[in-house]
Image (tube, rainbow, N blue to C red):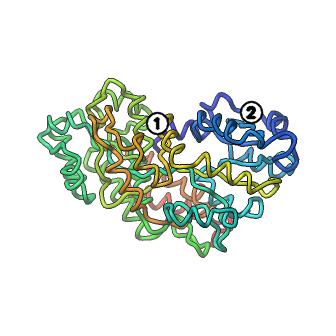
């Protein structure tokens, strides 16, 4: 699967400021998260703008905000804090991929709706607020950011291949997956060293985000063998059959830099991965729409644990940190794409991006964010879905037959689902 800078920062290892569990206890020694020791705020490297967090301390001097940037397995450390009871923070981040799990233990959190969350949700992105809401209507997450997806492409290589280079024309050319593969064949045919797909995992991530359901249905049943997912699989492995896969998952930055990768699908924050990984290609990249429709990769929340003494004050802090102006600052500081559409009209997002040849990329990502399809997310999706990624790797690195790989992925996923109690 695609490993990005944001994934790494949010996942663990690069967050060098991570704290051990004993340190967590030391920095959060108030049994209710607020009080004499102040208001503890947990987040991870790249999860919020550090400058905005520091400014919040000045904005709320009486709250005694104590930020802690938590490294390692954030979900596990938050679970440990909840188990201990006395060490839960007053405000905490929740990663998007972990929200389905934390909704299953919603009693650990405060309902943000009565505190002002209902009003905030009314003007926000419905699908994103829904991700942080339980089936019975408890709002446990206030959205920080989102990851609307698009297709990044090398305009100089497109020009060399005689392909359109304008984002509008490219978007029209790849409006369907058939169109994408036709363009990819022409690109690779005219510029043989360039491929339109960096890895099958990247395609699979986009394609599964376009489906109506993933691996576990709302009724708790196994859906990993659905014809919809099988069609997505066939679309992904088509890149391998056509010889259009660079298989560069383990060597992404050099492939971005030397022109091996001519198109790369990913979330808005992936722009920072590309610019960091291939700085000498500045001005050559552009952004166009995904084939068919966008999805969202990543995106996180702030939440208030149920033990917090003053949840209304905590909510006020959250709302200030995630105001449109501060979300725009987060985008400028660390490419944290705002979940609040009101931020999209501010200069930090509307100015042309020099790395992308002066293109106003919000013209692609803004509409994409509005069109992200809502999907049910099960707490078991990540575990049940892992075998599909494993089998795709065997297809691209070991030449495994794609249909046999599908059969094996479904069988392994069903075993995981059975162990988890999925019907």
Which of the 4 image quarters holds residue 188?
top left
The percent coordinates of residue 273 (x first, y second) are: 43, 35
Which of the 4 image quarters holds residue 381?
bottom right
Residue, disc 1:
332
Question: Which of 395/115 is in front?
Answer: 115
The percent coordinates of residue 195 (x first, y second) are: 27, 39
Label 1: which secondary element: helix
The answer to whether 395 appears left or right of 101 in the picture is left
Residue, disc 2:
19
Instruction: Please name the residue shown 65% across and 50% down the image.
Output: 318
Please say whether residue 216 is visible from this viewpoint. yes
Residue projecting furthest to the top = 280
In the picture shown, does residue 276 fall above or below 378?
above
Which of the 4 image quarters holds residue 26?
top right
Please say whether residue 263 is visible from this viewpoint. no
Crowd rating for badge 1 (residues with CA inside 10 Å; few <14, some 14–19, many 20+) = some
Instruction: Please name the residue shown 77% across and 46% down the image.
Output: 89
Disc 1 from disc 2: Cα separation: 27 Å
Instruction: Please name the residue shown 68% across and 43% down the image.
Output: 74
Q: Earlier in the sequence, mark 1 or mark 2?
A: 2
Q: Quadrant of the C terminus?
A: bottom right
Residue projecting furthest to the left = 162
The percent coordinates of residue 300 (x first, y second) are: 58, 50
Q: Mark 1, mark 2: which one is toward the viewer? A: 1
């Amino acid at each position: 699967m695609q490993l990005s800078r944001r994934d790494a920062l949010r996942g663990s290892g690069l967050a060098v400021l991570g704290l051990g569990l004993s340190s967590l206890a030391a920095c959060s020694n108030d049994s209710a998260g607020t009080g004499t020791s102040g208001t503890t705020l947990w987040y991870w490297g790249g999860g919020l703008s550090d400058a905005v967090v520091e400014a919040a301390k000045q904005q709320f001097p009486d709250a005694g905000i104590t930020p802690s940037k938590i490294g390692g397995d954030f979900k596990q450390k938050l679970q440990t804090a909840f188990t201990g009871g006395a060490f839960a923070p007053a405000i905490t981040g929740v990663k998007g991929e972990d929200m389905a799990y934390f909704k299953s233990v919603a009693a650990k959190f405060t309902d943000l709706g009565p505190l002002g969350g209902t009003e905030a949700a009314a003007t926000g992105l419905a699908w994103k607020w829904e991700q942080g809401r339980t089936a019975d209507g408890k709002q446990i997450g206030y959205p920080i950011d989102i990851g609307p997806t698009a297709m990044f492409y090398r305009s100089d290589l497109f020009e060399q291949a005689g392909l359109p280079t304008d984002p509008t024309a490219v978007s029209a050319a790849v409006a369907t997956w058939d169109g994408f593969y036709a363009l990819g064949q022409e690109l690779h045919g005219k510029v043989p060293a360039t491929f339109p797909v960096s890895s099958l995992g990247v395609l699979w991530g986009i394609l599964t985000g376009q489906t109506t359901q993933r691996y576990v249905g709302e009724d708790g049943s196994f859906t990993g063998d659905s014809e919809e997912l099988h069609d997505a699989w066939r679309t992904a492995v088509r890149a391998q059959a056509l010889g259009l896969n660079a298989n560069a998952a383990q060597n992404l930055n050099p492939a971005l830099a030397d022109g091996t990768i001519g198109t790369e699908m990913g979330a808005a924050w992936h722009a920072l991965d590309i610019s960091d990984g291939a700085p000498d290609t500045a001005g050559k990249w552009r952004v166009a729409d995904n084939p068919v429709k966008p999805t969202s990769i990543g995106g996180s929340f702030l939440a208030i644990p149920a033990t917090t003494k003053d949840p209304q004050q905590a909510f006020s802090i959250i709302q200030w940190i995630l105001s449109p102006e501060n979300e725009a600052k987060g985008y400028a500081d660390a490419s944290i794409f705002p979940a609040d559409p009101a931020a999209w009209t501010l200069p930090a997002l509307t100015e042309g991006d020099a790395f992308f040849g002066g293109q106003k990329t919000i013209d692609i990502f803004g509409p994409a964010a509005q069109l992200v399809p809502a999907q049910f997310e099960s707490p078991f999706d990540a575990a049940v879905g892992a075998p599909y990624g494993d089998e795709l790797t065997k297809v691209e690195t070991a030449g495994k037959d794609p249909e046999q790989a599908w059969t094996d992925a479904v069988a392994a996923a069903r075993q995981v689902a059975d162990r988890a109690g999925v019907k």
